[in-house]
Image (tube, grey):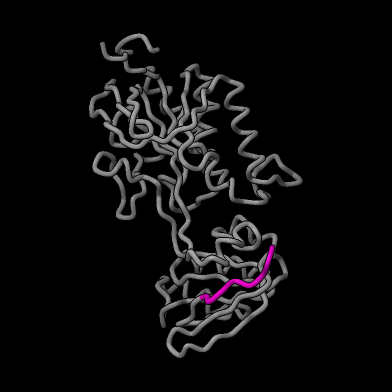
Amino acid sequence: MSEKIERLKTVIIGSGPAGYTAAIYAARADLKPVMYTGMEPGGQLTTTTEVDNFPGYPEGIDGPTMMVQLQQQAERFGTEVRIGMVTAVELSDETGGIHKLTIDSDKVIEAETVIISTGASAKYLNLPSEQRLRGGGVSACAVCDGFFYKGQDVAIVGGGDTAAEEASYLANICNKVTMLIRKDHMRASKAMQHRVNSLKNIDVRYNTEIDEVLGDQVVEGLRMVNNQTGKKEEIAITGLFIAIGHTPNTGIFKGQLDMDETGYILTKGKSTKTNKPGVFASGDAQDKEYRQAVTAAGTGCMAALDAERYLATVETPEEVV
């Protein structure tokens, strides 16, 4: 006789600020949420040394500690946090339908509602020196970490709108910003290019790539190389920002959920509703504009409220386990 498949009222996929906030609200609404943490419990904030821009922490807090506290708060209200990864999904098209999720390529569970908070992963250059100094001066978010380099010399890698915007942001608070662009032109919009070129303390280096990030424990400098001439040059910096894009962690939903051309899940209007009834998307999996912990938390709240309202409008097919 086959083992009975576990059926749950609400399953949350992912454990960053969006997922834990959704869990807090869902648990308080008696949705009995079960969270699967994914490969990186706590999400991107676990690689951030200091979080200084989340409301309620006047002295700041380190990312891992903040995520532990969010987990404790979610569990306090009854969230069940499970270590595991959702590796496949079969999402129902029907209102009131049951969604099937495969855990770790093995166990199948059923869910009446699903909240997706799988986040996005920053793209890095994958240089050994860059990876070694992540959290020690190498960052993928100037808006998050730029404040710590106020009045200092920093560098940023990238030539698109995000890189131009972050370079402009850094120029307002840092002494000097060296911008490395591997091609002979920016991909950024003309408006963003004009903004960068109008700022006197941004030094734009075209046809330039990183040869090595210098420093033992923290970033102390950068060795650059001109990819046309091969000439190398070293500069002293204390912070390096990588702005070459993000990849949303939404691969398992492709072909079932509506997405944009880069893989971000599309939601309806100002809600977190997807094209599948009872499936909601929150955080960086559906937000490519802001990508902040506080905005992710806000959409996690929205997703839980949307799930609660959805469940109130459909008849429960059978008693939930």
Magenta-span inclusion, residue 156: no
Q: Tell me which residue sits at (56%, 45%) in the image.
A: 293
In percent of width and height, residue 6 lies at 36, 17
Q: Tell me which residue sits at (34%, 39%) in the image.
A: 268
The stretch of residues the image draws in magenta is 210-217
Q: Tell me which residue sits at (64%, 68%) in the image.
A: 172
Residue 8 against residue 184 in the figure, above or below: above
Residue 153 against residue 205 in the figure, above or below: above
Residue 244 against residue 266 in the figure, above or below: below
In percent of width and height, residue 153 lies at 67, 73
Query: On the rendered image, what quadrant is the N terminus found in?
Result: top left
Query: On the rendered image, what quadrant is the C terminus found in?
Result: top left
- Can residue 115 be seen from the camera position used here? yes
- Please give left or right for residue 229 compared with residue 72 in the image: left
Magenta-span inclusion, residue 211: yes
Q: Tell me which residue sits at (40%, 46%) in the image.
A: 249
- Please give left or right for residue 64 compared with residue 95 in the image: right
- Occupied quadrant, residue 5: top left
**Closer to the camera, 272 or 99?**
99
Residue placed farthest to the front in the image?
A: 1
- Please give left or right for residue 257 compared with residue 190 in the image: left
In percent of width and height, residue 304 lies at 46, 28
Say how many tags the image has: 0
Kindly report the secondary structure that dominates the magenta region of the rendered protein: strand
**Closer to the camera, 182 or 125?**
125
In percent of width and height, residue 187 lies at 40, 72
